[in-house]
Amino acid sequence: EVQLVESGGGLVQPGGSLRLSCAASGFTFSRHEMNWVRQAPGKGLEWVSSINSGGSAMYYADSVKGRFTISRDNAKNSLYLQMNSLRAEDAAVYYCAREYCSGGSCYGGSDYWGQGTLVTVSS
Amino acid sequence: SYELTQPPSVSVSPGQTARITCSGDALPKQYAYWYQQKPGQAPVLLIYKDSERPSGIPERFSGSSSGTTVTLTISGVQAEDEADYYCQSADSSGTWVFGGGTKLTVL
């Protein structure tokens, strides 16, 4: 069974840092691009960052570029998001999600999502 | 920056057909994806590559594309289909974008 379990969320002051983790199981982690998507309370989905299967290419939303860093450890089946210089507008549930792949091909989009970890930014 | 535009809400009676649109300038060149999200739950991928359905997704969910607009069609809407629906695509640099979401109300 595919599982994605996020952790590391919590309350942080503006300007502070957090490191989110996503533990993957039930699939070959190293074959999938992985993504972070966030959702502020009562708001829509917002893409945050993506990393390719090998970890050599990373992409960021303009709203987090220069402050957030995505990484992965394929040996540990884990995805990370280092968040620095946090702002009130970064408060959200953060989901990790894997790229949809089937039959040896990958198609973009995300077919499995974790349940999310809540980040609160407040003094 | 690249944007995807969805109607904020759509209402339909049970058994009828719901159509949710998503417009964006890059959609003729980039694939679209559709997700369903129910309160307190993670999103579920309904449609990939404009019109393909992952295994396990009911046939009543279908997708289509025409120019700068993609459409999610839900045939024979059921009460359980009441949810938020999001389109998603990517631009040429590999960055993703989501539409603002559409709340489907089953009357």
Image (cartoon, coloured by chain):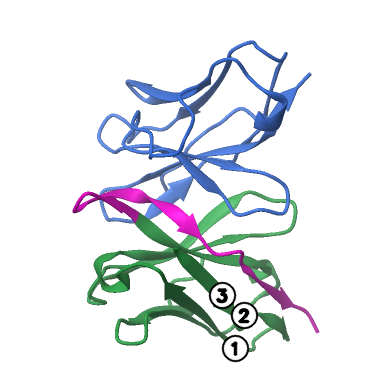
Subunit of label 3: A
Please tell me whether mark 1 sits on a helix, a strand or a loop.
loop
* Labels in figure, total: 3
> Crowding near pointer 1: few (<14 within 10 Å), some, many (20+)?
some
> Crowding near pointer 2: few (<14 within 10 Å), some, many (20+)?
many
Dominant SS type (magenta)? strand
Q: Nearer the viewer, residue B5 or A25?
A: A25
Subunit of label 1: A
Whether labels 3 and 1 belong to a single chain: the reply is: yes
Tell me the number on the disc at residue A6: 3
- Residue depicted at x 62% and y 80%: A86
Q: Nearer the viewer, residue B7 or B51?
A: B51
- Residue depicted at x 49% and y 67%: A3
Q: Is residue A116 magenta?
A: yes
Q: Position of residue A89 (x, y in %)?
A: 67, 67
Say left or right for A88 vs B25.
right
Q: What residue is disc 2 on? A: A86
Alpha carbon distance from label 1 to label 2: 6 Å
Q: Marks 3 and 2: in contact by CB < 8 Å? A: no
Q: What residue is disc 1 on? A: A17
Where is B14 relative to A25, above or below?
above
In the figure, the shade used to draw chain B is blue
Q: Residue B54, located in which quarter of the rendered image? A: top left
Mark found first going from the N terminus, 1 or 2: 1
Where is A92 relative to B76, above or below?
below
Q: Is residue A106 magenta?
A: yes
Please tell me whether mark 2 sits on a helix, a strand or a loop.
loop
Looking at numbered disc 2 in the image, what kind of residue is underneath it? Leu
Q: Marks 2 and 1: in contact by CB < 8 Å? A: yes
Span shown in magenta: A100-123
Looking at numbered disc 1 in the image, what kind of residue is underneath it? Ser
